[in-house]
Image (cartoon, rainbow, N blue to C red):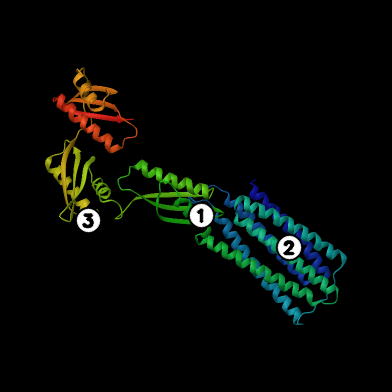
Amino acid sequence: MSPQRRTALVSVGAACLLVVIKLVAGVASSSLGLLAEAAHSGTDLAAALLTFFAVSVAVRPADRGHPWGHGKAQNLAALAEAGFLILISLGIASAAILRLAGVVEFDVEPTGWTFAAIALVLVIDASRTVVSLRGARRYRSDALLANALHFGSDFAGTIAVLAGLVAATLGFPAGDSIAALFVSGLVVAAAVRLGSRNVDALMDRTPEEEEHIARGAIAVLEPPVELRRLRLRRSGGEHFADVVIGVAPGAAIGQGHAAADRVEDALQQALPGIDVVVHVEPRGAEGAIRERALAAALTVSHVREIHNLTVLDVNGSTEVTLHVKLPGELSLDRAHDIAEEVEAAICRDVPEVSSVQTHLEPLAETAAGEEVDVDPALIVSAVREETGAAPRELRFVRTDDGLVVFLTLGLGGHESLADAHGAASSIEARVREAVPAIADVVIHTEP
């Protein structure tokens, strides 16, 4: 048996005992206050049984028919408890008013063992309030919290009944009826608060405090994440979050997934146990034109690669040029149609762009190559003259397109990426000049 169910079962036993004690003492002493408390405990017994049932259902794991779990069974049970409390309290209040008005007369005759019974009730009420409150906090259970509130109101109500019986003993019989009215008002107020809380949960009202915590956790992430939407709800003490974030249109899938993971981790730390779903979207009009144009081009079927995408300002108009790689086996007619689709997609998704020029290239899925021996002296000499040191690695590979040189250069780690790229470009030009037969030069720079 789960700890939540054990806590609920203890409440059932305590409620049964209290009903018997209050009912017997109330009948024996003709105390309307004690009878009201007996009825109150009777509703608590029903409430405890509902809680036991609700917790038993709520702890079940999610299934196909209930993918978010069964937690709202606790909210339904707590709402039913609130209804029971209001109905019985109204009945008790009516009886107290009739007695105060003289329509119904009762002689209140408390005895010593009546007060002893009340003392026992106070001990039981206090202990079960503490047990249920601890269980509610530990397991974040709305149903157990409802029990704790009921038991706490029982304790306060019993104190009022005790005061009324003392007043009746001292010659003021109306004190018992006044105590009954006080208990009724106390219970109705607690039931209304309880009902309101659980209606909010059933209607998926956003918990404001938790939402503030969640937004704060996302706001402090580094690097920053653009939060577009956050929807938060509670169910059976658990939190569920639906988050939408924006990333750069040109970001790789891995980058978007990494951003989503950071958001999920941040919310898990801020609200332990929360169930988070993060949806990643490309940024809209506020993103860079280049990124949006790239994202639009990549939505076209058959487009394998985009490079050399440039945004130009021509006489106040924005133009885009780009190289598009397509499968080499496509006919020119089909390739041209795809290029027009790319141009149309960019103009549609980036209204600021007035003109798009595409350069088509075939994409070789694989290229045959074999490593060959070539005299490296000329290339090593060119690299030394440019950098003052020999290359860290030098290889020659013969491919279908010709001879390719692979160079690894060591540069100062403090240099900017722009400076490193400039040095690599200069060396590439020197290598091509030294060995005109080379088809391509691939240079890797490292600190």
Q: Nearer the viewer, residue 402 or 164?
A: 402
Taking the image as shown, residue 253 lies to the left or right of residue 364, namely: right
Label 1: how many Cα within 10 Å (few below 14, some 14–19, many 20+): some
Query: Which of label 2 and label 1 is nearer to you?
Result: 1
Circle 1 is placed at which residue position? Answer: 213
* Amino acid type at image mark 1: Ile
Which residue in the protein does label 2 denote?
A: 155
Q: Position of residue 397 (x, y in %)?
A: 22, 23
Q: Residue at x 81, y 69 (%)?
A: 27
N-terminal label among 2 and 1: 2
Q: CA distance from mark 3 to mark 1?
A: 39 Å
Count neighbours of disc 3 (C-alpha within 10 A) and say few if under 14, some if 14 to 19, many if 20 or more: some
Is 444 displayed left or right of 52 in the figure?
left
Q: Quadrant of the N terminus?
A: top right
Question: How many angstroms separate mark 2 from mark 1 (CA)?
Answer: 35 Å
Q: Earlier in the sequence, mark 3 or mark 1?
A: 1
Residue 446: horizontal and vertical position, in percent? 32, 30
Residue type pointed to by label 3:
Glu
Q: Residue at 44%, 49% (x, y): give it.
A: 277
Relative to the observer, which residue lies in front, 444 or 415? 415
- Inter-mark Cα distance, 2 to 3: 71 Å
- Which quadrant of the figure has residue 16? bottom right
Compare residues 433 and 217 and report the one nearer the observer.
Answer: 433
Kind of residue indicated by mark 2: Phe
Q: Secondary structure at mark 1?
A: helix
289, 78: nearer the viewer: 289
**Residue 235, image x and y in percent?**
53, 55
Position of 408 relative to 227 (above/below) = above
Residue of label 3:
352
Is 39 on the left or on the right of 251, as rendered?
Answer: right
Say left or right for 157 vs 292: right
Q: Is residue 297 above or below residue 204?
A: above
